Image (tube, rainbow, N blue to C red):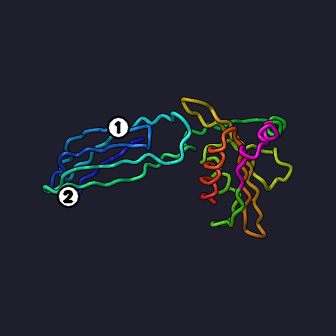
Amino acid sequence: MYLFYGNKTSVQFQSFCPTVTHPGDLQTHILLSQVDGGAQVQQVLNIECLRDFITAPLLTVRFRYGGAAQALTLKLPVTINKFFQPTEMAAQDFFQRWKQLSLPQQEAQKIFQANHPMDSEVTKAKLLGFGSALLDNVDPNPENYVGAGIVQTKALQVGCLLRLEPNAQAQMYRLTLRTSKESVSRHLCELLAEQF
């Protein structure tokens, strides 16, 4: 991830120190020392997923401006789906795996009202952008969307299957996610439902 810090004032930012934190695991301090007036500084973060997570990492930027201490805390746009690898599979393989993931804790389902127009091409783009492969000719209903992927972490790989069923008349969706890990199913379902 590339971060750019810009100082649009004419006064130097002193003792400039961005810190990345993630509850429980990660804390990285990067001392840039100063950002001159009118200057922009680039920072590169190399982010590796150690295990599944729910809360986004935080970036806290501390510096002195005109002698006064300043601090800004922002959420980094890093969610578990950023570590999704799309996986292609045939209909037979998809349904075999779907049946294997049939325990209640392996499934998360959400029925919700559409917040945006229900456009097929936009829906496909959102599902692909989320990180899953879109599997054509898998669902018996051609209006439904089916996807598959693997969340890659250093500790383990979590296979994920999804099914999005639009109901254009009611302007609603039913989203179902099945994974081998309960927390991943629930979190991915919440994150993806926000897109529609």
Q: Which residue is mark 2?
A: 9
Judge whether residue 107 is colored magenta: yes
Among the two numbered marks 2 and 1 on one chain, the one whose residue lies closer to the N terminus? 2
Query: Of residues 101 and 193, which is closer to you in this image?
Result: 101
> Quarter holding the N terminus?
top left
Q: Is residue 122 above or below residue 27?
A: below
Q: Which residue is mark 1?
A: 28
Judge whether residue 103 is colored magenta: yes
Give the SS element for disc 2. loop
Looking at the picture, how far across and down is residue 4, in whole percent? 33, 47
Give the SS element for disc 1. strand
Looking at the picture, how far across and down is residue 81, in whole percent? 58, 44
Which residue does the image show at 50% across and 48% down from the upper left?
55
Q: Amino acid at mark 2?
A: Thr
Marking on residue 57: none
Q: Label 1 crowding class (10 Å Cα cut-off): few <14, some 14-19, many 20+?
A: few
Q: Is residue 48 above or below residue 74?
A: above
Nearest-to-viewer mark from 2 and 1 = 1
Query: Of residues 145 and 69, which is closer to you in this image?
Result: 69
Which residue does the image show at 29% across and 38% down from the upper left?
30
Which residue does the image show at 13% across and 55% down from the upper left?
67
Which residue does the image show at 73% across and 68% down from the upper left?
171
Residue with the most extreme left position = 67
Q: Amino acid at mark 1?
A: Thr
Q: Which residues are magenta?
A: 97-109
The answer to which image quadrant residue 123 occupies is bottom right
- From the viewer's perspective, tell me whether residue 44 is left or right of residue 69: right
Q: Label 2 crowding class (10 Å Cα cut-off): few <14, some 14-19, many 20+?
A: few
Q: Are marks 2 and 1 in contact (CB under 8 Å)?
A: no
